[in-house]
Image (cartoon, rainbow, N blue to C red):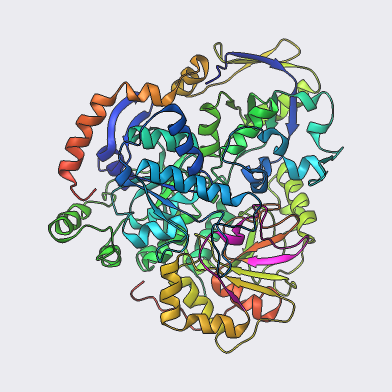
Amino acid sequence: MEKFIRLTGVAAPLPRPNIDTDAIIPSREMKRVSKEGLGEGLFADWRYSDVAARVPNPDFVLNRPPFDRAPILIGGANFGCGSSREHAVWALKDYGVRCVIAPSFGAIFQGNCVRNGILPLVLAEGHVTALAAAADHRPLTIDLDALTVTLPSGDALTFTIPPADRQMLLEGLDPIGVTLKRLPAIIAFEADHLSRHSWI
Amino acid sequence: MGSTLVEKLWSRHRVADLGDGTDLLYVDRVLLHERTGSIALKELAEKGRAVRHPGRAFVCMDHIVDTRPGRGDETVMPGGTAFIRETRAAATAAGIHVFDIGHDNQGIVHVVSPEQGIALPGLTLVCPDSHTCTQGGLGALAWGIGSSEAAHALATQTLVVRRPRQMRVRFEGTPGPGVSPKDMILHLIATHGADGGAGHAVEFCGPAVTALPVEGRMTLCNMAVEFAAWTGLCAPDAKTIAWIEGRPHAPKEDAWVAAVADWADLHSDADAVFDREIVIDCADIAPYVTWGTSPQHAVPITGQVPALDEARDATAAAAWQRALSYMGLNPGQPLAGLPIDGAFIGSCTNSRLSDLRAAAEVLRGRKVAPGVRAICVPGSMRVKAAAEAEGLHTIFLDAGFEWRESGCSMCFFAGGEHFGQSERVVTTTNRNFENRQGPGTRSHLASPATVAASAIAGRLADARGHTTPAPTGGV
């Protein structure tokens, strides 16, 4: 998995609560059994005025430079709620987004981000709003090692993230490989568990 | 200090404490479907990783399959056939059982798993599908995950999970006539917000939950994810045990006796401590319908679209304005009486036999209004067969409903069948998001009875007075 350590770039504001994964990638944009090439379908219903013909909607933030190349999104509360589709995260990644800042995230989406090298960064709602205003069109710097978001003014906000998520992102770990190192413990647990609950 | 039900299930499955509130949990069952499970199987195969216990994994073809009579692998959705065939091939290669198209047991994963006895009280169960929480209605710890986590669960039979906070939602009193489990959960979400359960495992309890049939508890738990909960569940009781006994994958003979004895401990202790508690008086719950594009945008069917100045803050007001624009509605407009173009009964929320009975009670001897496209999609082929055995299909067909094969169908638009641009649809599904059921389609979530009454009226309608309560015994 690609590591996430430090990132500098502009942040596209999407100040709406409850942006769901159907909006991030509509189901019809998930065309193949593949994680690849999903960026084109990112926010398709909002991004295109004619989805089939891929006509850009000039009013949508990701169609307005410099946000068309933004590696950071700033969203509202409960970002990524709804469907578990990991395609939402694969679409963000393919488009070039590496960090989403929001007051809260849908739980499955948040986990999917961490497993794909995207930082789901939680800040208090007031800080998210202030950050979007302070950043405007200018770049932010996010440092996962130092746990800071540095504004264009040079001021920095701090944030927290579960240590396991931070480690996975910083080191780009393969979660299955990490767990398989515990296989002896899993086998021992399993033997005991199944002996107590034979019907499993 | 006692333990909550979730804490008990958690400690039963903890393989290792990974520190910082995170544990490695043992996973008893992994369920997959062709939409997101396909890619989990593909990833494992590409990396040369084996499925650790193929006998405890199951695949359901539900998301992309057509629901038209005479269907096969071909789909209205462009490219759907590849999902079906790749999933089938990968599952077969891994030795995983497939509830496949054309089989008597095919259906929506969260309907099939309980009715097959795959989901059981006390088990941990995961699926790369957000509505896996449905199966918490049986007292399982069941939660939705992504495809990468599904691959992890298949390869290791474990998942790394952060301990959720504990919430109890207690439904006191008795719901009034015509108030269904769907209305109970919409009331909770409308009252406490679509992010009200964030970070929590939610136990639904109280006299009104105890009184619910098992299928109704699954409807309640189904929309825990729409409340942003990590999962929802109900403690198993005698009703649960009676519902499970004899199902194909349920334990038999001595194992059944041992399982039933074991399940007696699956309840929150009297002195268990919850981080948060919500108490709802069921007398406050009316049949609900949504007006906007989030499940929290719900009001009683007798109510109106709220005024923008009722919104909690400017962000919410802006979201309401956007939702009203999408839905073609104005503040203050009554919901009842809005003309509809479509009516849909189905989905993992409301497609079980009890749901079809509730709708049929309203539809019996009546006709769908002219110009309304009405569709019923049973939750599984077994539900369909059971409904046909008691003649429900003739009620739906005589009323003018389409009577489909099982699948997720028009709960969401995947490029195949859908409702039209700006069409107003009343639906028993779980998500009224923009474009969920079709580009520009306006979805109003409601109970099966409300959908049936609305289909007949040709307008959003209150089912009360048009029905007798659905049977509550046995299901």
Quadrant for residue A12, please give it.
top right
**In the image as oriented, which residue stretches furthest toward the right?**
A58
**In the image as oriented, which residue stretches furthest toward the bottom?**
B365
Where residue B337 appears, as percent x and y from the top left, is 73, 75
Give the camera-side residue of B340 and B147: B147
**Is residue B424 within the magenta segment?**
yes
Quadrant for residue B17, please give it.
top left
Q: In this view, does B89 lie above or below B373?
A: above
Q: In this view, does B170 lie to the left or right of B331?
A: left
**In the image as oriented, which residue stretches furthest toward the left?**
B254
The answer to whether residue B42 is visible is yes
Q: Is residue B59 left or right of residue A123?
A: left
Q: Is residue B246 left or right of residue B345?
A: left
| Residue at figure coordinates x 39%, y 42% from the top left | B93
Where residue B243 appears, as percent x and y from the top left, is 30, 66
Where residue B245 appears, as percent x and y from the top left, is 25, 65
- The boundaries of the magenta stretch are B401-426
Q: In this view, does B49 lie above or below A77?
A: above
| Residue at figure coordinates x 27%, y 43% from the top left | B8
**Is residue B237 within the magenta segment?**
no
Total numbered labels placed on residues in the image? 0
Give the camera-side residue of A24 and B152: B152
Q: Is residue B383 above or below residue B312?
A: below
The answer to whether residue B162 is visible is no
Give the camera-side residue of A167 and B42: B42
| Residue at figure coordinates x 78%, y 60% from the top left | B421
Q: Predominant secondary structure in magenta?
A: loop
Quadrant for residue A55, please give it.
top right
Image quadrant holding the N terminus of chain B, namely top left
Where residue B338 appears, as percent x and y from the top left, is 74, 71
